[in-house]
Amino acid sequence: MSSTLQGKTILITGATAGIGFATAQSLLQQGARLVITGRNQERLNQAVRKLGERVIPVLCDSANVAQIQQMATQLQRDNIKLDGLILNAGVFYPVAFEQMSLDNLNTTMAVNFNGPALTLQALLPCLNNPSSVVFISSVAVLKAFATAGVYSASKAAFEGLARVLNLELAERGIRINSIRPGVTATEIQAKAGMDQDAISGFFESLSSTPVGRVLTPEDLVPAINYLISDASIGLRNAYIDIDGGFGL
């Protein structure tokens, strides 16, 4: 069976674990060639060993502007042209607004907004006409969660930018669409400071949602596949909410 992704070259940011890694596995199975980024060389190497030879690893922290520019220069030097870009790298550092620090604000915005914005800008010369950009947003832009204000704002900020870019980049054949995952079991919970008991209790509370469980990265992959493929050629600034009915 032929795939609309056969022979496509796609870059995924933050692809060493979670949604990015699951997406990489799926795209490779469909015949795509991948460039993946990660901010830790050891974890990047581990991901490549698992994914195989059709993967080009690039050490790139989405909060590091110099590394983003170096990545773009490397791809141009190697004459790598991209058919798709998946802006997946993100962080979540929950804090109540009253305790919010400038460091928390700047760190979150650096990865969740500045990172994807500057990555897309730097990679414009590498993007084919047509090409698809998929932003991994969050249900948090629609539903309020206490202590998630900065995270919500960072995701909503890029969604606002993407609306404008769909106009500005239309002549280049670049389209930008998003998925908005609900609560998904990845490393993000532990990195947010939750211990295993808190994570387990949180996930158990999701049994009352229509889907009856916490989402997994694999639940999100089909929608990403669709948006990154030629099948979504008619979509601009579309949002696919994948929350298992959490927002009902």
Image (cartoon, grey):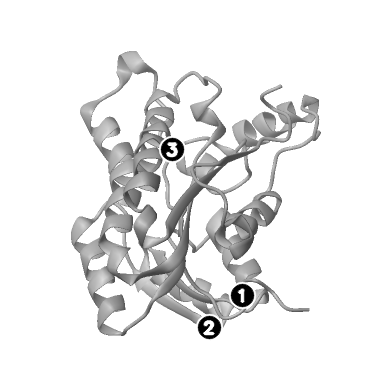
**Name of the residue lying farthest toward the front:** 171
Does dot 2 land on a helix, a strand or a loop? loop
- Count residues near mark 2 (Cα–Cα under 10 Å), then give few for <14, some for 14-19, many for 20+: some
- Residue in view at x 41 percent, y 23 percent: 149
**Name of the residue lying farthest toward the top:** 98
Identity of the amino acid at label 1? Leu
The picture places residue 63, in percent across and down from the top left corner, at 27, 51
The picture places residue 14, in percent across and down from the top left corner, at 44, 58
The CA distance from mark 2 to mark 1 is 8 Å
- Count residues near mark 1 (Cα–Cα under 10 Å), then give few for <14, some for 14-19, many for 20+: many
Quarter of the rendering occupied by the C terminus: top right
Identity of the amino acid at label 2? Arg
**In the image, is 157 to the left or to the right of 65?**
right
Residue hosting label 1: 28
Does dot 3 land on a helix, a strand or a loop? loop
Residue 54 marker: 2
Is tag 3's residue or tag 2's residue first in the polypeptide sequence? 2
**In the image, is 235 to the left or to the right of 95?**
right
Quadrant of residue 147 in the image? top left
Residue 92 marker: 3
- Count residues near mark 3 (Cα–Cα under 10 Å), then give few for <14, some for 14-19, many for 20+: many
